[in-house]
Amino acid sequence: MDKAVTPQREPIGADKYIYVSPDHTFGTDAVLLADFARAKKTDVMVDLGTGCGIIPFLMLRDGKLRSASGVDISAEAIALANKTAKEQGFNAFCGINADICDLKGKLTFGDKTLVTCNPPYKKAGAGIKAESGKRLIARQETTCTLGDIIEVSSRLLTYGGRLCMCQRPERLGELITLMSRYDVEPKRLRLVCKTGAEAPWLVLIEGRRGGKSGMVIEPTLCLYKSGELSGEMKRIYGPYKEAYL
């Protein structure tokens, strides 16, 4: 880990915390994805581009997952995640410092029941560049593309295994096309908006490797109602939000 950066503890509820840094923290989208994935106690899970590990750690906090691997190209991110796992007793977690396009010898393929990914939302060179190289990797497809993520996920998954991702709504068409190309059939989709009066800012999607055609469109999730967190958002935040009350 970069010695110039002092990691900070971020409470996630239930007397648990994770380590974060300025370059490796998390937002609402990761919390939403962790809930949307509906992890099970029996899941063998991989989180691609795991960062500080928030998605698997929220699941492990709630007693889910048989095992969890978090993959990230940043050594600092993996050091943070492994530090959290060691101190918090998340023994089912293993952090792997690797490029997701080069996982041979680091992970086995074809046996994972769940893959999650909160990917960079912008294509390389699109939008405003982030403040640092690490943030640029997190926000733009500089080291891997959406197609790379879905292709690798398909190879990691067992038949019937699930891929759960979030993305900006403007890339939904591309996302569905790529999932179908790599034999991950879109099965469940949910749009997220800040209020009912605003257009969605996020899409959550689940696909199954080798699944039959047919997708369920779930009710739109609104973060706020009447100026306050909606009832569903309070449920999703759960003990994470309670850590600040």
Image (spheres, rainbow, N blue to C red):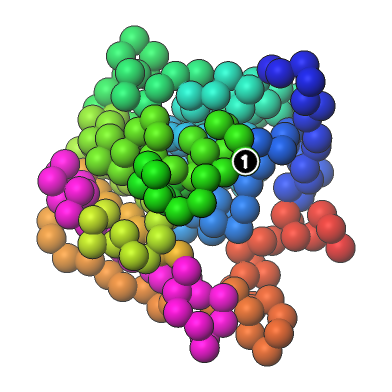
Return the x and y of residue 151 as percentages of the image width and height.
23, 36
Give residue 245's quadrant in the image: bottom right
Return the x and y of residue 81 as percentages of the image width and height.
64, 28
**Viewer-side residue, 135 vs 105:** 135
Circle 1: residue type: Glu
Q: Is residue 118 toward the left or the right of residue 53 in the image?
A: left
- The residue that appears at 61% across and 35% down in the rendered structure is 132
- Report whether residue 30 is seen: yes
- The residue that appears at 29% across and 62% down in the rendered structure is 172
**Viewer-side residue, 198 vs 17:** 198
- Report whether residue 40 is seen: no
Q: Is residue 129 toward the left or the right of residue 20 in the image?
A: left
Query: Is the residue 137 above or below the residue 107 in the image?
Result: below
Query: Is the residue 208 above or below the residue 84 in the image?
Result: below
Q: Is residue 65 toward the left or the right of residue 241 in the image?
A: left
Return the x and y of residue 218 as percentages of the image width and height.
37, 73
**Viewer-side residue, 128 vs 109:** 128
Return the x and y of residue 40 as percentages of the image width and height.
46, 46
Label 1 sits on residue: 131
Q: Secondary structure at mark 1?
A: loop
Q: In the picture, which quadrant includes the N terminus?
A: top right
User: Which residues, given as a range, are shown in magenta?
Assistant: 176-201
**Viewer-side residue, 8 vs 143:** 143
Give residue 135's quadrant in the image: top right
- The residue that appears at 72% across and 34% down in the rendered structure is 21
Q: Check if residue 196 falls in the magenta segment.
A: yes
